[in-house]
Amino acid sequence: MEFLTDVAVLSRIQFAITVIFHFLFVPLSIGLGLFVALAETRYYRTRDPKDRAATKFWVKIFTTTFIIGVATGITMEFSFGTNWANYSRFVGDIFGAPLAAEALLAFFLESVFLGIVIFARNKISPKLYLVSAWLTWFGSALSALWILIANSWMQTPAGYALAPDKSKAVITDFWAAALNPSTLARYLHAVDSLLILGSFCVMAIGAWYLVKKRNTDHGKQFIKMGLTVGIVTVILMLPFAHMQATVVAEQQPAKLAAMEGQWKDGPADMAIVGWVDEANKTTTALSIPGMTSFLASWNTETVYPGLDTMANKVSLSDFKAYDGVKVTEDYQGGIPPVNVTFQAYHLMVALYALLILWLVLAGLALRNANKGKTSKALLYLTIFGPLVPFLAIQSGWVVAEVGRQPWVVYNLMLTNEAYSPIVSNVELIITIVLFLLFYTILFIAWLRLVFKQIKAGPQLEDDAGLAAALATAGSSAADAASSDAGSVAKDASATDDTPVAKGGE
């Protein structure tokens, strides 16, 4: 239980809890935001009340998730100043720009147009409402870009210079910092994974309706929409993953070696399954020779440095932020926790393979439903499908963040030098317990709201009422017009009769 007295470890645990909980909702809001826009596009074209009900349904799910995501994100950002003060001082000049841009440009855009989507359905033109739905999703995707720019800079710093006393990094080129070597690859890889999760959630809800034999038309439509987006995004993950592998190989060789448990220099194999014995520096695995080298360079013979080489030959004096005097015990040659990184990476890869299988199963379930058959086994598998991309996303973040250790800013600042020195272990333990309690309550509340909305399903009542009101208004207008026409005709008849009568007289 020594970790209970280690402020650095407790700070990392608290931040991990906050980030993991926050990242329950960010993928859902970005992934489902696309389906809000797609549903509204469908309604704009068809003007079918069922499609309008579908849009309103997805807006409710998206809004509920968005609100929780915002609340947990604020907590996460505050922890930079409270628990990671040294880190904040070191990167403040760099982080300020993307975080400010995220708040002023992306979050503001998303919030404004979400307000229009929620409250202005009958107050603006259908075209403007459609544009607002797409801008809401675009804002959420743009928000992810700025956050990933900040995180990517921690992985591959660029566009900066160290202060004379080496106490902080100062931005020298905004665009070089923003478009650092890993930004594009990480953004495409991350956002595509969020859209995959969104598509699987949409399919799951559709499958639930088919199992319950309620809202079956919407159920089939949701599975079809989710399946279409899911197939496209799962295919796109292949080139995006290749881009990511290339960046890691070029910029973070220690992470690449840890991902495959490679201790000696040579071509990097791809393990299917295995175990790393860090004490003896050995890896036992069933591997495809040279496959990771191929993914990173299109050549199975490309040689990459092993962990032994990097641990033995690299010292802190090689990095700009250090002068060779400041050496800490946690450095260990800059080698990350190998087995954790190895297992998380291969879990992510295995889950990607399962994504393909789950898409096939969802496709079979939809085909049977279109034929009037209910395949409960396939439908239940589809319902639980979102667990696959969710676990893949979380394991991917473990690879990204644990694989960066012992650095909080790669090759510039060690994690054990980034936490706040005045925060005590007792304070951290108390806040961790309180966070767990509060987040559990918040998560249960979110689940209850979302399940209630799913159970209610897309509602046609308002649309029917609107249609009835329009019909009544139209009928009243027609009656009024008819009455007015009759009056006019009567008046005209009377007017015409008078001269005739007078003429007759």
Image (spheres, rainbow, N blue to C red):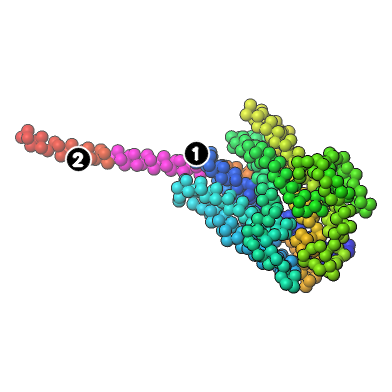
Asked if residue 46 lies left or right of residue 387, the reply is left
Three-letter amino acid code at the position of disc 2: Asp
Q: Is residue 191 magenta?
A: no
Range shown magenta: 462-483
Residue 39 visible in the shown view: yes
In the rendered image, the quadrant that contains the N terminus is bottom right
Q: Position of residue 99 (x, y in %)?
A: 64, 61
Q: Is residue 466 magenta?
A: yes
Asked if residue 145 lies left or right of residue 7, the reply is left
Work out whether residue 86 or residue 181 is closer to the camera in this orientation and state it: 181
Residue 201 visible in the shown view: no
> Tag 1: Cα neighbours inside 10 Å, few (<14), some, or many (≥20)?
few
Determine the secondary structure under disc 1. Answer: helix
Q: Position of residue 17 (x, y in %)?
A: 75, 58
Residue at image location 30% in from the left, 38% down from the top: 482
Work out whether residue 480 or residue 134 is closer to the camera in this orientation and state it: 134
Residue on which the image places disc 2:
491
Q: Position of residue 23 (x, y in %)?
A: 70, 53
Determine the secondary structure under disc 2. Answer: helix
Residue at image location 64% in from the left, 54% down from the top: 145
Q: Main secondary structure of the magenta part?
A: helix
Residue at image location 63% in from the left, 50% down from the top: 29
Query: Is 379 above or below relative to 434?
Result: above
Residue on which the image places disc 1:
45
